[in-house]
Amino acid sequence: MKLSEGQLKQILQQQSARSTARAVDCLTEDQFARAASGAMNKDERAKVARHLITCSDCTEEYRIIRSLKPWASDADQVLGAQVKSSQTPFWSNVQEYFWPSRTAFALGAMLFVLLLGGIWVIWNRQKQSDELARLNQQLTESEQALSSVQESLRESERRLTDLEESTRRQSNDRAPLPNATEANSERGTRDQNQPQLEVPIVDLDPSPVRGGSGSSGTVITVPETASSFTLILHFSGESAPRYEVEILDRRGREIWQGRVRERGESRSINLTLSRGLVTSGKYLIRLYALRGGGRDSIAEYPFEVRYR
């Protein structure tokens, strides 16, 4: 069946329809064909040129059509030569009746090439769209992973801040006294600014049994008129550059720690305790000698406090 030029154009328009809506001012298939074949006048060429400057889609399609134009010309030459070599008067009349003119055939070949070009353009755009969607998905996943890492870092910073604050409070609670010639607590020093009656002064000798926090040891009775009491810790052995004193409660938890300098010939340390630090109950004092970066245990003093 012979197709007219209008039917061929209609088939091309249906097959090369864009995946997205064409802008109103974009070139039609007929304009592409006429532009590629040089059939436009000067005004039409100028209009097409202005549009191609601003429309990348039409520019890409025009470039593809221009690159396929030599194929249509070669096909037209080969088919024209074959028809001319085999023509006879009889067959020439038959050709004129059944075969379209060379111009119509060339136009059909051009439209077929345009059809292939349009299909390739649509396929290429779909491929680019799929690639763009994949890249967007990867970007979204990367952003989610980055957000998770940032949240973990913020949580770690909060935990580190809490740990530093807790360590600072513990250090303040356990810090040795600045003027430590005698192991007196700061609160006990303030209490001693006021006159006190019947303040107990008790001599403590080292316990023969180490780790005896469970035993009562020496019982110290503190009257209600005294807000503090003083212990004299006696010890023996070689002197050390510094000494460290620890006070443990009946559960073995450290409630205070302090250091004093070398005692010279004296083998005793005075330790004043206040009601605010030491309540009624059993306690254990441990004395250490500090030498060369090490700490040697030299004595332990279990005692029990009773307030009237």
Image: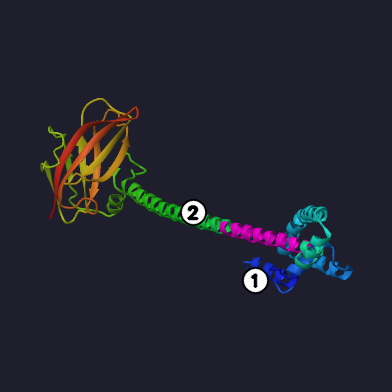
Distance of label 2 from label 1 (alpha carbons):
38 Å
Q: Is residue 177 left or right of residue 128?
A: left
Q: Nearer the viewer, residue 107 or 214?
A: 107
Residue name at image x 71 percent, y 61 percent? 112
Instruction: Indicate the colouring scheme.
Output: rainbow
Residue 271 x %, y %: 24, 42
Q: Which residue is disc 2 drawn over?
A: 146
Q: Which residue is disc 1 drawn over?
A: 21
Instruction: Please state the extent of the stretch shown in magenta in the rendering.
Output: 106-130
Looking at the rendered image, the quarter that the N terminus falls into is bottom right
Looking at the rendered image, the quarter that the C terminus falls into is bottom left
Q: Is residue 124 left or right of residue 236?
A: right
Decide whether residue 123 is among the magenta residues.
Answer: yes
> Mark 1 belongs to which amino acid?
Ala
Q: Main secondary structure of the magenta part?
A: helix
Q: Is residue 136 left or right of residue 10?
A: left
The residue carrying pointer 1 sits among few (fewer than 14), some (14 to 19) or many (20 or more) residues within 10 Å by Cα, namely: few
